Every structure is written in C-alpha cells, then in structure tokens.
Amino acid sequence: MAGSENAAQHATTIGGYVQAIAKALDYCGVDSARVFRAAAVSSPMANDPMLRVPVVDLTRLYRTCVDVTNNPYFGLTVARFIHISNLHALGYALAASDTLMDFCLRLERYFRVVSQSAKITIGEADGRVMLRAEHLADVSGETEDAFLGFVVLAMRQLSDAAFNPLAVEFRHAVPRDGSGPYEALFRSSVDFSRAHSLLVFLKTDLQRKLAGACPELAQVSAPGDR
C-alpha cells in the first residue's frame, strides 16, 4: 500500500499538456507566463517528449488558473487546445487509427506513457463501449475535464462533427454554476460525483472506417500494436 501511495505522489504527465494550458490562458486574455510564475510551475518552452510535469504541480497550476480567470470550467477550455502533437507518438497513432474503436484501444494500451495519473480501460456491454479512467493519483477536476473533453473533440475531428457520446460521468462534483457547459460540449447526459471518469459510446458509432486511417503510420507510432 505504501508503495502505491508513493507512486501516486510522484505521478507525472507529459509536458506537452502544459502547452495547452498556456494557450488556453492566452485565449482568455490572461498572461500565461505570469500565471505560471504565480503557481511556481515552469513555463513550457518546447513540446519536448522527454519533459514530464508532476501531477501535484498541475493541480496547483489549475487552481491558480481558475482563480485568475474566475472560470470553474477552465478545464473544458483547455480541452480545445490539446493537439495530437502534444501526445507525440501516441497522438499520431490515435490520428492514424482505422476506426474510433482502434482509437480507444490504443488509448487504453498506451495512456500510461502520457500520464501516470490514471489507468484507462475499455469495456463492452449491450452494444455500448465504455472508456473508463480509474484515477491512480489525486488529480484536479480541471484535469478530468480536459482529458474527457479532448477525447470527444478528437473523435469528432477524426470522424464526424456530429459525433456524440451516449453519456459522460465525472468523479468531481458539479461546479457551482451547474452542468450547462458540459452538456454544450459533450451534447449528452452528464453525471457528477461518480466513482470514475467515464465515456459511454454506441459501439456501431466506433466501428465506422475513418477517412484518415493509415495503418503504416499507426504501426510506426505505436509499434507494440497487435
């Protein structure tokens, strides 16, 4: 138990994610460099695949961002600025997926390379696919919002702008101003204060061939695929 607690305390996330936070701050008209200094977090200088950021630093940074922007939905804004290049090889493998189901399975298999804060699992039942994030470290609600938002927005970019999940669940509580911004982004039912982060999809929606499918690029980016 002590070993798992120690690992959670030292969990890290890929540094490219911090670039998305900086871009979201700039979009909101806030000096991102000033916010990073206030949170005692190094400003992102480059999208270096070797750069890691402690999850505890991200939590502190997000608290500062929410205070400065006075926006409890800031994590949803960050979701719009996460680019596949911020995930490096995994991002390109996701973009080259044959179907959205392949996208989900790659995320399940390789997410640990991006972040040690959660474990992704894919399950199926009654014609539905569940993408669940079991949190291994204490992450902020904004991190949760940014991740689930990114997944759905990336799926829309790769498939169809009209694509929606069937349901979304968050571990954190509903913000003080309600669930409206979540419903607007996800265009589905949204629940809060649940055991895990969860996205539920109709399986047939995930089985359609993607126009940008490229097995060769996916294999190069994620050579362990089988």
Image (tube, grey):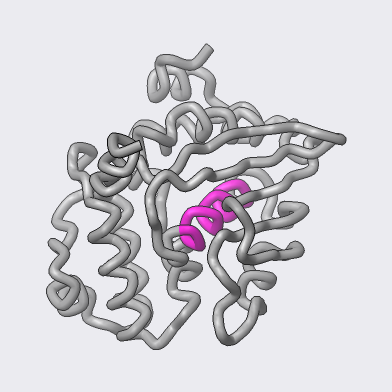
In this picture, is 136 found above or below 105?
Answer: below
Judge whether 166 appears above or below 201 on screen: below
Give the number of marks: 0
Q: Residue 95 or 143: which is nearer the viewer?
A: 143
Q: Tell me residue 106's x, y (percent).
A: 52, 29
Residue 221 against residue 199 in the figure, above or below: above
In the figure, residue 6 lies in which quadrant?
top left
Specify whether residue 151 is painted magenta: yes
Quarter holding the N terminus is top left
The answer to whether residue 96 shows anywhere in this view is no
Range covered by the magenta-colored residues? 144-156
Q: Quadrant of residue 118?
A: top left
**Residue lying at 48% horizontally and 38% vertically, measured from the top left:** 119
Residue at 35 percent across and 33 percent down: it is: 113
Q: Is residue 139 left or right of residue 3?
A: right
Residue at the right extreme?
A: 126
Q: Is residue 17 left or right of residue 51?
A: right
Magenta: main secondary structure: helix
- Asked if residue 78 lies in the magenta stretch, the reply is no
**Residue positioned 17% across, 51% down in the render:** 46
